[in-house]
Image: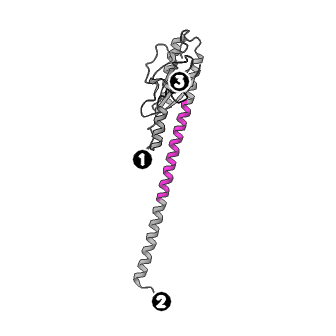
Amino acid sequence: MLKHPFGQRCRSRGTSLLEALVALLVLALGVLGLTRVHVSSMLESRHTTARSIAVSMATDMLERMRANPAPAAVNPYAAYTAGFGKLDAPKALCNAKKCQSAELAAFDVWAWKALLQAELPEGDGAVFASPEDPTQFAVLIAWDMSLGSPSGLAPSANDQQLHTAATAVWRAPDTQGTGIAAAACPAKRICHLVFIRP
């Protein structure tokens, strides 16, 4: 029976330890990859939920406009137009008493913006009348895109280009956008644009 020299036994033991370390490194890289995929899918799910809320809030504004019993005769629903930013509470709280048409419109816009703030991260909204068609309105809903995003997951150049294109105001026919210069998406926000006709 031949015995292995002492040096060969040490080399054999060192090789097994090196193989175990390499296997551990491969496992760690796999777990990191799965973690990144999981975080990306969670963020995508969060953005999808926010877009769903934005669509629902645009429908809510449409229903509020339609429920106003007697909009102004000269420019129907003009009292529902509002820019971005927080509004002061209206003088008449129409959930507690009966209001006139203009009071109800002011209350509806204030309540709608408060609901946006509660439903979306730093949510805000604007309602703009179409310059060509007074019966059509653009509802532009914005929310903060950075809340909950890990700093290590920076958007790709393609994602940034798509965001820039989506938030631009286009004036050419058959393109996206509101066509109103003041209706651009605020900086560092994600926006969802819905056209409504009360």
Residue at 49%, 24% in the rendered image: 179
When asked about the image quadrant of residue 157, the answer is top left
Rounded to the nearest whole Å, what is the CA distance between mark 1 and mark 3? 35 Å
Q: Nearer the viewer, mark 2 or mark 3?
A: 3
**Which residue position holds label 3?**
138
Q: Secondary structure at mark 1?
A: loop
Residue 131: give x, y in percent of width and height. Answer: 51, 18
Q: Nearer the viewer, mark 2 or mark 1?
A: 1
Q: Secondary structure at mark 2?
A: loop
Residue stretch in magenta: 28-54
Residue 113, above or below 77: below
**Which residue position holds label 2?**
2
Q: Please, what is the three-letter code of the amino acid marked with disc 1?
A: Gly
Mark 3 neighbour density, 10 Å: few (under 14) some (14–19) many (20 or more): many
Q: Please, what is the three-letter code of the amino acid marked with disc 3?
A: Ala
- Taking the image as shown, residue 118 lies to the left or right of residue 66, namely left
Q: Are marks 2 and 1 in contact (CB under 8 Å)?
A: no
Of mark 2 and mark 1, the one earlier in the sequence is 2
**Which residue position holds label 1?**
152
Residue 30: give x, y in percent of width and height. Answer: 50, 57
Of mark 1 and mark 3, the one earlier in the sequence is 3
Examine the rendering and report whether any part of residue 159 can be seen: yes
Q: Please, what is the three-letter code of the amino acid marked with disc 2?
A: Leu
Question: What secondary structure prevails in the magenta region?
Answer: helix
Residue at 53%, 45% in the rendered image: 41
Residue at 51%, 48% in the rendered image: 38
